[in-house]
């Protein structure tokens, strides 16, 4: 299994996969073997295989929060969002300071259009890890979905303060500006730094005529 871990560390997941498959055959009661098999399959977008592997992993160690989180990722990939949410919730129950899992709780709730609950999960994630930029962007998305545009802009601006060229935050800002009337738009742009406002205007022009904006992967 050491060779598989080395290959996975180099992101050579296809090459690593047979080593972990063999490891689970040789040691079917090994949590580590099933965990790494699930991790590798998830990275290959083999969601059903990832789900099967993590089902074994959590059966062997029901207290492994990260395995529940990754089981949620596989379920999300399978578009089984209610089940993904349950897995993520189990992860944060086991590890209440697991910021990544709180972000995933929010993502699952967002997919289910439960935006107020999603916002609370993202708030928890950024409280635990103030530098978690994806969670800040997701917080902005939830605020936007709730019609709280100025607060959403503030969330995106926080991201842009730390990562000025981050396209997903610029796109989020542009998406809000495209929804606002001219007067509101000018007022809202005053909330941005000059550089952020210029970049957002550029993104707005680029995305003009479309309210569907590409989002960064979680």
Image: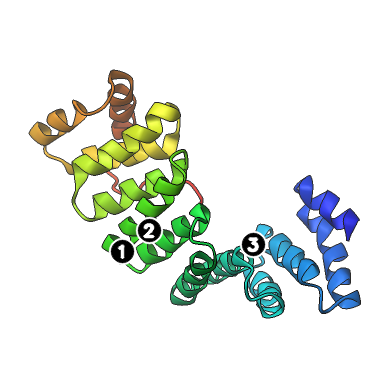
On screen, residue 177 above or below 56: above
- In the picture, the disc for residue 149 is none
Residue 102: quadrant of the picture: bottom left
Q: In the picture, which quadrant includes the N terminus?
A: bottom right
The residue sitting at 37% across, 58% down in the picture is 121
The residue sitting at 47% across, 43% down in the picture is 132
Identify the residue under disc 3.
45
Q: How is the image coloured?
A: rainbow
* Disc 2/disc 1 C-alpha distance (Å): 7 Å
Q: Earlier in the sequence, mark 3 or mark 1?
A: 3
Residue 91 horizontal/vertical position (percent): 53, 67
| Number of residues whose C-alpha sits closer than 10 Å to that of mark 2, classed few (under 14), some (14–19) or many (20 or more) | many
Left or right of 1 on screen, residue 91? left
Left or right of 211 on screen, residue 63? right
Residue 36 visible here: yes
| Number of residues whose C-alpha sits closer than 10 Å to that of mark 1, classed few (under 14), some (14–19) or many (20 or more) | some
The residue sitting at 29% across, 31% down in the picture is 205
Residue 46: quadrant of the picture: bottom right
- In the picture, the disc for residue 121 is 2
In this view, which residue lies farthest toward the left? 183
Q: Are marks 2 and 1 in contact (CB under 8 Å)?
A: yes
The residue sitting at 89% across, 70% down in the picture is 22
Identify the residue under disc 1.
117
Residue 200 horizontal/vertical position (percent): 31, 30
> At numbered mark 2, what does the secondary structure look like: helix, strand or loop?
helix
On screen, residue 11 above or below 18: above
Residue 47: quadrant of the picture: bottom right
Q: Earlier in the sequence, mark 3 or mark 2?
A: 3
* Disc 3/disc 1 C-alpha distance (Å): 28 Å
Residue 84 horizontal/vertical position (percent): 50, 71
Circle 3 or circle 2, nearest the eye: 2
């Amino acid at each position: 299994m050491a060779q598989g871990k080395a290959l996975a560390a180099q992101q050579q997941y296809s090459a690593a996969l047979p080593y972990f498959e063999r490891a689970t055959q040789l040691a079917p009661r090994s949590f580590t073997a099933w965990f790494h098999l699930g991790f590798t399959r998830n990275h290959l977008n083999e969601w059903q295989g990832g789900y099967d592997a993590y089902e074994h992993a959590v059966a062997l160690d029901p207290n492994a929060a990260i395995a529940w989180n990754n089981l949620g990722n596989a379920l999300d990939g399978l578009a089984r969002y209610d089940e993904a949410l349950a897995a993520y919730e189990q992860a944060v129950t086991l590890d209440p300071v697991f910021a990544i899992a709180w972000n995933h709780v929010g993502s699952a709730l967002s997919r289910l259009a439960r935006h107020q609950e999603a916002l609370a999960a993202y708030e928890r994630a950024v409280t635990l890890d103030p530098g978690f930029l994806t969670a800040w962007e997701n917080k902005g998305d939830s605020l936007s979905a709730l019609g709280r545009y100025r607060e959403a802009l503030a969330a995106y601006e926080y991201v842009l303060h730390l990562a000025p060229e981050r396209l997903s935050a610029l796109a989020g800002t542009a998406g809000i500006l495209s929804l606002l009337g001219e007067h509101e738009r000018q007022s809202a742009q005053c909330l941005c730094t000059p550089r952020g406002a210029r970049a957002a205007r550029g993104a707005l022009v680029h995305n003009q005529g479309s309210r569907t904006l590409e989002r960064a992967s979680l």
